[in-house]
Image (tube, grey):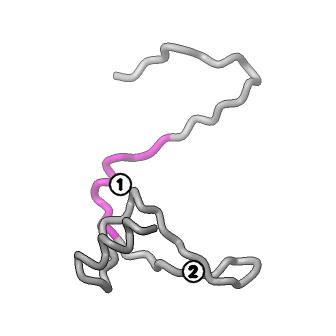
Amino acid sequence: MLYVTQVAEVGSGGDTLFANMHLTYDVPRTEQPLVIRHPDTGLKLLFINKPHMSAITQLSTTESTAVLDML
């Protein structure tokens, strides 16, 4: 059971977000591109979120770890 321990003053902001953790657990992992194009400029950029990446599937485990550690 969740309960409130502190309440922000009315009008002080503070967004509340909720996530369905059951749905998140059941969704299969998907592969994401490492390089994408910026929607406004069209320039290529790295699209990497290291805490959420386990490997670069196109590389060997050793190469993947080395690249992610470098970035």
| Crowdedness near tag 1: few (<14), some (14–19) or many (≥20) residues, C-alpha within 10 Å | few
**What amino acid is labelled 2 in the image?**
Ile
**x, y percentage for residue 18?**
49, 41
Give the labeled residue for mark 2. Answer: 36
- Residues rendered magenta in the picture: 18-29
Residue 61 on image: x %, y %: 23, 76
Percent of width and height locating residue 2: 39, 23
Q: Is residue 25 magenta?
A: yes
Q: Closer to the camera, 54 or 26?
A: 54
Question: Sequence order check: which comes first, mark 1 or mark 2?
Answer: 1
Residue at point 30%, 80% (across, down): 57
Q: Which residue is mark 1?
A: 24
Distance from Cα at disc 1 to Cα at disc 2 = 24 Å
The magenta stretch spans residue 69: no
For marks 1 and 2, give the one nearer the viewer.
2
Q: Amino acid at mark 1?
A: Thr
Residue at left 29%, top 79%? Answer: 63
Percent coordinates x, y for residue 15 in the rendering: 63, 36
The front one of 38 and 6 is 38
Q: How many marks?
A: 2
Residue 22 higher or lower than 29, as above or below: above
Image position of 44 with respect to 47: above or below: below
